[in-house]
Amino acid sequence: MFNKDRWDEILEALNANKVRTALTAFGVFWGITILVLLLALTNGLRNGVTSDFGNFATNSMFMWSQRTSISYKGIPKGKRLQYKISDVEAIRAEIPELKYISPRNSLGGYQGANNVIRGTKTGAFQIYGDYPEFIKQKPMDILEGRFLSYSDINAKRKICVIGPDVVKGLYDKDEEVIGSYIKINGVNFKVVGTFKITNSQGDSEEEANTVFIPFTTFNQAFNYGDRVSWMAITAKDGFSITSIKERVFDIIKSRKNVHPDDDRAIGHFDRAEAFGRINGLFNILAIVGYFVGILILASGVIGINNIMLIVVKERTKEIGVRRALGATPWMIKGQILQESLILTILSGMLGVAFAAFVIWGMNSVLDSVGPVENFANPSVSMTVVIVALTILVLAGVLAGLIPANRATKMKPVDALRIE
Amino acid sequence: MIQIKDLHKSYHMGSNSLHVLKGINFNVKEGELVSIMGSSGSGKSTLLNILGMLDEADRGSYVLDGVPIKNLNEKIAAKYRNEFLGFIFQSFNLINYKTAVDNVALPMFYKGINRKERVEKARHYLEKVGLADWSHHLPSELSGGQKQRVAIARALASEPKVLLADEPTGALDTKTSYEVMDLIQGINDEGKTILVVTHEEDIAHMTKRIVNLKDGVIIDDSPVEQVRAKQHV
């Protein structure tokens, strides 16, 4: 369909009136530029807001204990719940749809009192007792060594994995970290790994000041018995944590003698729900972006439609001549359609390129002035570009359809008579 | 080459009906050079349009080179026009944004001939009409006579059976007219069948046969002594 001859024919025709072609193309160029920019800005907002969520697995919730608010089975309200390891095992046994259940305990705190010592250096760090699967829930890069393992859990090994700021605070430059020992609350731990958490905005400083040790070691070393402070629970792919969580609560309620309606006894944060709410908001924004963008694009397309009608009218005689020379109606229609298609696609591609350039500019400004609140990395995916191109192709055909039909409606003998 | 029997054509404008052709009968043999004469409104252009398949007759038969021309849809008409006919117009009708050689190559484009061959042939025909040096000029850079010669080259390019010329000298001065007629005579000498519609006596006498139309009927159809245009150039 697009051999070189056709191209020549079309380019010749478009070149015949350069200014008008350029002005017409501008309408579509502008429309697609605005469409792509709107979507990129929406994306920037979405990235900015959702990055506050960090990169914790989305289909997850955190569950911690609170005080009961309804007296039940003779126990007055106001009792503080205490989760145990056995609760974790019960949940795991009864709800196979859950992928990970990580019991967690923590100690000390970033910006708290100094709790870690190495030689003459000390620091205040967040100490977590964790299970090996925690790294699957909260992805992090292991820079050196390894993360916790189940043999550490079983043997209650005194080992730890430390964050970049812990390394900075306790070690000199070029000092070997792996294999060295640090003292946490008076207990010696061997460092087996260092990690870095990328792509987290709000808590990056806190996360960098974190020390992970095996959960069992934590409980033994710091006298926690079988207590669990809170759990990070992730559902299997294909199941939604939001729909499973009530079953988790029911298990806890029955095991802890909590009134079935006492929802305040169990504290939780459903990441999937919160994420879904925010995502839904941005999906609506994206739809608004498409809507406005396509409307603006439509005016550009109508411009092309208009110009093609004028072109056809102007070239009535030429079309008559072409038909006298043996052009079939389809050849004429094809040419008009292709002219409009190429004009639309060409100007659209320019629009996409221009929008990409503007987005690139925005990103480099953002990079140089540092992070802006609730706005990060405005970008469009390949999908958006493909959608935009599809819209352009459809628009080009639509814009050419009426003029193409008009072009062949007149009999050649009448077309030739036009002066 | 052309057989026409009892051809009728009328135009309807609102409630008025205009009977333009009222039963035309005539034949053209291969290699003839015929002029069709008549005052305006005599139906000569209508006849030429029907011969050119740009318009269809209401009644009667038309056979071109053994092929009955009837019930044409636009696609077949376009194919026949491309294969059988070459058009020469009074106002040249060159495509103004195409160079001379591209204009000449256009019918071959619709025939589906590849570009290289097209350009080669187009050059050949431009040379034949004496415009080899002008092949890359736009129509706006050519004189009237040159434009008409490009148009003639274009008409020849698809190697048609019949050339149809509608007032080919109507927009030209006498001297240029004779030059164009000289070219047409030369093409006819090579055996091409040519029909010329004209209302100029001197041009008509440069053909070999004059068909005179009046009010939609042929009132006279006779061979003439051909005046060679060359003598007047």
Image (tube, coloured by chain):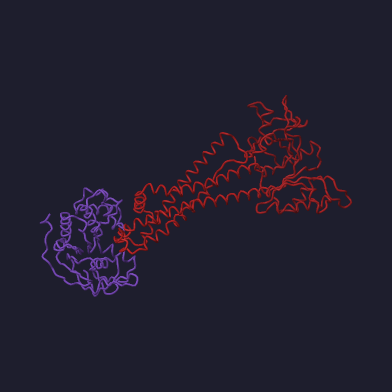
Chain colours: A red, B purple
Q: Residue furthest front?
A: B15
Above or below, comparing residue A193 to residue A30 in the picture? above
Residue closer to the observer: A288 or A12: A288
Q: What quarter of the picture does the C terminus of chain B occupy?
A: bottom left
Work out whether residue A100 can be spotted: no
Q: Is residue A416 above or below residue A385?
A: below
- A113 to the left or right of B66: right
Height in image: A75 above or below B19?
above
Q: Is residue A230 left or right of residue B160?
A: right
Where residue A205 appears, as percent x and y from the top left, is: 67, 34
At x 73%, y 25%, the residue is A119
Tell me what residue is drawn at x 16 percent, y 67 percent: B210
**In this rendering, position of residue B71 left or right of residue A27:** left
Q: Position of residue A278 (x, y in %)?
A: 65, 48
Query: In which quarter of the view is residue A165 placed?
Result: top right
Seen as rendered, the residue at the extreme right is A74
Of residues A35 and A356, the one nearer the viewer is A35
Confirm whether residue A282 shows in the render. yes
Which quadrant would the N terminus of chain B be assigned to in this image?
bottom left
Image point (69%, 43%), residue name: A134
Image location of residue A409, percent across then percent down: 37, 63
**Callout count:** 0
- The percent position of residue B5, horizontal first and vertical second, equals 23, 74
